[in-house]
Amino acid sequence: MKFVDEANIVVIAGNGGNGSASFRREKYIPFGGPDGGDGGRGGSVLLEGDSGLNTLVDFRHMRKYQAQNGQHGSGRNKTGKSGENVVVRVPLGTVINDAETGERVGDVTNHGQQLLVAKGGRGGLGNVHFKSSTNRSPRQTVPGSAGDTFELHLELKVLADVGLLGFPNAGKSTLISTVSAARPKVADYPFTTLYPNLGVVRIDVDRSFVIADIPGLIEGAAEGTGLGVQFLKHLQRTRLLLHLVDLSPLMPDVDPVEQVRQLQKELWNFDPGLMDKPRWLVFTKADLLPPDEARSKAEEAVAALGWEEPWMLISSVTKSGTDELMQKVSLELEILKDEAAVLEQPETGSDED
């Protein structure tokens, strides 16, 4: 299935039904008075989060969503039937903006969460509302109001706890296929990953987290070079970033220190906020070097960078260090979630006289 993370749609809410101008007509009641009913409410358009979806590809084929109009009122004080709402399913992590103004409408992050994006029009009033002692036969009514019509821009930012980033062939796809059930394409040429892959890492029965494999970045990615630029935004919702660095001797001209610095620059150019996220260094393909040489090379890079965050040396092929890495990541995520929960708690204070 093709991965699509942006789409434009048009949402049209239903119009409210008109109020009725009707008079009671019954035998033996010559002056029955007004009995015109109100119009029905127009249907609304809502977006609903669905954890079973992971792309916006459906919106490439279906771009217009229109709710029903409310029915008009009728005699005998009958209110018109309200129009049916239209509920559009979207993947979790969808951000909704007004396509014309760019104004943020909202975002959908939870399964079953509904977001009203186009409100149906109000039903009009029938002539029964305008009866008075001086106007016993009112012909005045109020028409139903029009429903909202908007063009919306949908943007998907995948929801993951951990984001894997690095240059092409850094071993991101191999790692996610080793630690989760995800099966991304793995090959020995650059840009194997063409779209984000999500995997669930299960530590035990009660502990798991979602990890995202982002397409490889190259120098100038933040300005549009290569494939990664269109997926950098998916890192914005993650809690922890794992920066994978290739230690392979098959690429002797590539300096791991320079790769880290280049990627830091791309993150800063795209969104300085990404630099504030916890980011660990993970040196990959350790199996291609003797153990002592691999560790020495990694330690030299850490020292040259002045790296203060955690770092690890792994081999996804032999699974050396991968279980330990996932265990440490799980513990770190629990700490980050606890810290976030504390920050979200409202401040409580006592009022003193």
Image: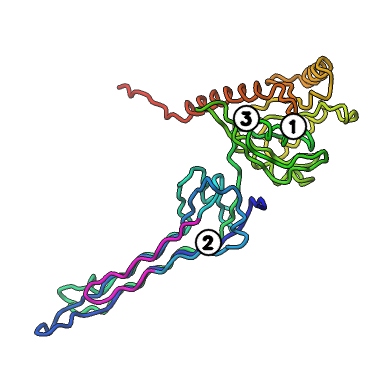
- Give the left or right position of residue 266, taking residue 241 as reference: right
Please state which of residues 199 and 68 is positioned toward the viewer in this rendering. Answer: 199
Which span is picked out in magenta? 70-88
What is the x, y in percent for residue 270? Answer: 70, 40
What is the x, y in percent for residue 313? Answer: 74, 21
Identify residue type, mark 2: Phe
> Label 3: how many residues lie within 10 Å, few (<14), some (14-19) or many (20+)?
many
Q: Secondary structure at mark 1?
A: helix
Q: Secondary structure at mark 3?
A: strand
Identify residue type, mark 1: Gln
Looking at the image, the residue that sits furthest to the right is: 253
In this picture, is 335 found above or below 64?
above
Disc number placed over residue 264 in the picture, else none = 1
Q: Secondary structure at mark 2?
A: strand
Q: Are marks 1 and 2 in contact (CB under 8 Å)?
A: no
Q: Earlier in the sequence, mark 1 or mark 2?
A: 2
Residue placed under numbered mark 2 in the picture: 150
